[in-house]
Each structure stands twice: as C-alpha cells, then as structure tokens.
Amino acid sequence: MTVRKTPSLAVLAGAAVLVTLAACDGKSDTAGATADGGPIKVSASDTACEVSATTAGAGNVTFEITNKGTKVTEFYLYAEGDRIMGEVENIAPGLNRRLIVEVADAGKYQTACKPGMAGAGIRGDFTVTGGVAKQNDANAQKAQATKSYADYIANNTAALEEETAKFAGLVKTGKVDEAKAAYARTRVYYERIEPVAEKFGDLDPAIDVREADLEPGQKFTGFHRLEKDLFVSGPQADTPQIADKLLTDVKDLVAKSKTLELTALDLANGAKGLLDEVATGKITGEEETFSHTDLWDFQANLDGSKGAITSLRPILQAKDAALTSTLDKEFANVQGLLDKQRVGDGFKLYTDLSQDQVKEFASAVDALSEPLSKVAEVVSK
Amino acid sequence: MLFSSALIGLREGLEAALVVSILVAFLVKTDRRHALRWVWPGVGAAVLLSVAVGAILTYTTAQLSFEHQELLGGSLSIVAVVFVTAMIFWMRKASKSIAAELRGKMDDALDVGPAAVLLLSFLAVGREGLETAVFFYSAVQTAQSDTVQPLIGFAVGILASVVLAWLLYKGAVRFNLGKFFTITGVLLVFVAAGVLGYGLHDLQEAAFLPGIGTLAFDASATLPETSWYGALLKGIFNYSQQTTVLQAIAWVAYVVIVLPLFLKPSKKTAPVPAAAAASKE
C-alpha cells in the first residue's frame, strides 16, 4: 500500500486538466452575435425551431436554447456536410441551455433542433460573416513566413559572427593580404541581413558607417574603417582596437537579432530596402570606396532580398500570383547580369566595370525595385 | 416535463451507478470489505470535480469548447472500458480460484489495489459527470427563473437510479459466488461494450474520429431514448438510438472477443487471459 497517494493525485491531475481546458477555452467575451449583443435565442418546441437571428459575426456565437415543447430536445450547429460545430444534448422540456460555439470561418451553417433527440432535426440556415478565418489563415501564413525568414537570419548571423572573428584575427595579427581577401567574404553575411541590422539604431553605423557619411564628432569604426586601413592607408595604431570593437559589435548584433520579432511587413520592407541599398550604394560604387568590392555586397543584398521574398512566397502566391512571377523574372534578370561579372568565386571590382555595365545594372535594379515596392501592400492586404 | 427530466436523471445516474454497484457487490461477495472504503472517495472525487467544473462553466465566462468536452468524455469512457475489462477478467480469475480454495482465503495476489478500486469508481462516475453537472445547473437556473419541474424531475431520476443500482446490488449478492461472477461478468461485458461504443461516438462527434454520419441503424422510431425503456437501455448498456457504423463494429468486436474469453472454461494448463485488474501495491 505504498501508492496510497497515487489515486488522489490522479484525481487532482484530472481536475487540473479540466480547469486548464476550461481556462484555455475561456473567452472574456461571452457575448453572442445579435445586434444587441445578447445571445441568440432559440425557441425549440416539438415542431419548431425558432432562431432569433440567422446571421452572426465570426468568433464566439452564443445560443440560448429554451425547450418549450414536451419532448427532450437537442440543439446543433452544423457546418457544411453536417460537421458538428457544437451541440447541446438533453434539453429537457422547460429548460434553458446555453451553447457557445467558436466559429472561425465565415460561411453557411445550419441550426437544428432535434425534438426527441432523433432524426435530422428541424433545420434552419445560419450565416456567419466576417473574416476571422481568413485572418487566421493569413496570420498562420505570416507566422510561417516570419519563422522561415528568422531561420535565414539565424543562419547568416551565425556565419557573420564566425567570419568576423576570423577577419578580425587576421587584421590584428597583421596579415594584411589575407585580411583583404577575407574582407568582402565576411561582409556578405552582413549585407544579406542589413534590414535586421538597421533595426538596432546604434549598431549599424558602428559596424557599417562609410567615411563619407560620418557625422561631425563621430568616430570612424567598423568594416569600412578597416577597409581603409587594409586597402589604402595601411594598419594604424588603433587598428587592432577597431577590429576588436567590430567583433564585439557584431556579437552584440547577433545576440540582439535572436530576440527580434519581425512581422511579415518587416520582411516586405526589408526586401525593398535591400534593393534601395543596391541602387544608392553599390551601383554607384560608394559603399566599398577603398576596396571596390561593391559587387559582393550587391550579390549579398540581392540574396537577402530574395530570402525575404522566398519566405513571403506562399502569401504572395495566394494574393497576387502575377506579382510573384514578375518578381521571379526580375530577380533572375539582375542575377544574370551579376553572373556575367563573376571572377573565380568572387566578382569583378567596381572600378573595372564600364559605364554601360553600370547603367545596365541600374536599370535592372529599378525594374526589380518596382514590383518589390508593391509587396508590402499585398502582404498587408 | 417532469417525466422527461426524470428519465434523463435516471439514465445518467444509472450510467454511473451500475458499475459502482457491481463493484461494491463484488467486493462484498469476495470478503474484501476493506477495499470498500476506496469506492466512495473515487465516487466523491468524480462528483465533486464534475460539480465544481460544472459550476465554473455555468457561472463564469470560462468555457469548455464542444470538441474538448466530447474529447474528454470520450477519452474517459475508453479508459473506463479498460478498467471494466480488467475487472471482468479479474472476476474470472477470482471465480476460478474460489473453486479451488476456501472462501476468504483467496490468493493474496488476487487482491485488489486501492488505486484500482478508486480509479474505477472515479471513471465510472466521472466520465459522464460533467455533462450531467451542466444539465443539473441549467435545471437549477430554470428553477430560479421559471419552473422547478425539470429540477425535481432530475432529482427523482437520480434517486431512482440509485434505488435501482441498490436493488441490483441486493439481487446480485443473493446469488452464490459462481453464479454471481458469471452473471455480473456477462452484464459487465455488455456494459463495457456500450461504454466503448459511447466513447467512440463522442470522439466522432468531436470530429476526432470520422464517420459521425454513417449510421449502422437508426431506431429512433421503434426504440426511442426518450421512452422509459429506451432510457433504461441507455443507462445500463449505453444503447444509442442512432448508432454509427464504427460504434456498432466496436461493440460487436468487443463482445465477440471478450465474452468467449470470459466464459471459456479454464483448463488447468491454459494460461489465464492476461489482464491485470489489481494494480499491485
């Protein structure tokens, strides 16, 4: 008899489950859906089933059934194909019973009273309006999209931290040539997730400020400061500290990005933002003014934009298939131009591009920006 | 008005009281009165829990969605079937050993654990308790605002079911042991088959299992649940006037498998069907 506690524990556990279930299903509003906000009154008798309202908004619908007949009755709410949405059995003559049904989908339903609890019942059509369901569907899709993009971010931030650590190490040990070779490769991971980095106001400038954009009194730090030291002026006295700070900032960014809650709209805006980055920085050759590795950044921005669009794809496909195929086409067009400039596992330097090639890039980027700018609106529809 | 509420009370009451009364008769018959004190906590806990949750659902804004309610009732019913089945085979075992041994000196290994007794009592009452409690509260509310008839009817029905269960108990304990085991065992086989079908039907209603609309038969006209005999049938054997195919198959399968196993004479060498009723303490 050592298990004497078990039975009562089991009972307690059962109670907890029940109460939890009730609490989970609990809604703060038990309001029905009639105009006056009260429950929908159902007057059931042996021959009739009078429902005081035949429409309700999606959400919780409350029925108050009164059995005025002589037989025990049941009340059902059926969805199409007689799927039971909710039921109350054993409504004895004279009783009032309440039924609260959560109806998520707008559409056609049927109410039914079953005097004698038998047969198909006395049916009536019931319409549920509103778009909780669509909203839920859309919300589920959006949640899926943001989750998928979060995975993309996580992969890239992990790689960014790893590569930055290597890069900073090379800089600090004075291996200039190796550091130069690693520079563009490391920045790729940053450029892919730039919209996320920009969410953290002070980190993005610290990591990625260009010399030309420095505010008065602002210290020149980050990737571009090291770019200048490596490619132009040679290592300075404080170069190792700058490298250390870059790594610290990147780690900080990676940690913060893990807690970031993005919305589908953020993805859409980010995809567009990345292309704007390309148009304003990379096409002009201003981003990598010392190393001229702008095309690496260009490719990375394009990847990031594509990553966001890929995550949003199910939503876009459902809402605007034409836009989706336009995007595919324009992405492919820009990628095609970039591929032409590949050298080994990298790209031509910006300074080796002809004016015509730059123009060609610019117009291809514009052609992609245009459909991208519509994504946010489609997503938030 | 009064009568139909009384039938509901009778039916729901019987569903709960029947297994309990057989259990009690069985413990008394086999001189296991010490285990009786585990019956009432189980019953009490189930009643209290049902009444408490029923009150929460009735008087607060908390709700149990229809699916959850059916899932709960259905799952508890199926767990109850497992326990009742174990009890059936335990009885078989006990009856065989009684032939061999003097009464009151039964093999200690066949002793029933308090946990088993308590859980069986709890499940027998608890599986339908919530629905009954909610019905009770609506009768109470109706009594406050409109008419006391449903409430009185319900109370009369519950009372009648308790009386019936008591009569059953009284009748059962009059038989000699061997007969008692056979009769109550066979009765329990059909009860358990009904509970199984009932539980599956609940799960079908919650759309957890398919086929709610596929009926094996519809006897609403010939044998309605709202008649007194229909209510009795439902209370005792969980008869449903509209039985789904799945329910019917489960019922038949259960009876076809369990009944012969229960009734087959045990050979000295044949192993006894394995079903551990008593959780060993």
Image (cartoon, coloured by chain):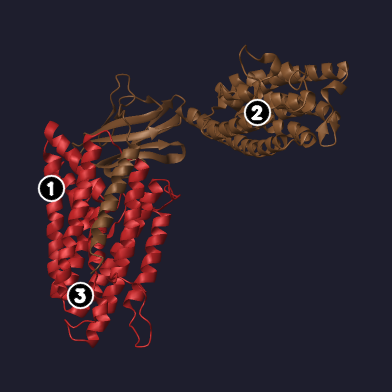
Chain colours: A brown, B red
Type of the residue with mark 1:
Ala
- Percent x, y for residue B27? 18, 71
In this rendering, which labeled residue sits more in front, label 2 or label 1? Answer: 2
> Residue at (55%, 24%) from the top-left corner?
A200
Q: Return the disc, 1 or 3, that comes first in the chain's sequence.
A: 1
> Residue at (70%, 24%) from the top-left corner?
A224
Position of residue A345 in the picture relative to residue A28 (left or right): right
Disc 1: CA contacts within 10 A as few (<14), some (14-19) or many (>=20)? many
Q: Is residue B126 above or below residue A349?
A: below
Camera-side residue: A254 or B90? Answer: A254
Q: Which residue is mark 1?
A: B155
Disc 3: CA contacts within 10 A as few (<14), some (14-19) or many (>=20)? many
Chain letter belonging to callout 1: B
Type of the residue with mark 2:
Ile
Same chain for mark 1 and mark 3? The answer is yes
Quadrant into which the C terminus of chain B falls: bottom left
Disc 2: CA contacts within 10 A as few (<14), some (14-19) or many (>=20)? many
> Residue at (17%, 73%) from the top-left corner?
B32
| Distance between the alpha carbons at the discs numbered 2 and 3 | 91 Å
Q: Residue placed farthest to the front in the image?
A: A237
Instruction: Name the element at disc 1.
Output: helix
Chain letter belonging to callout 3: B
Q: Which residue is mark 3?
A: B180
Instruction: Name the element at disc 2.
Output: helix
Q: Which mark is residue A242?
A: 2
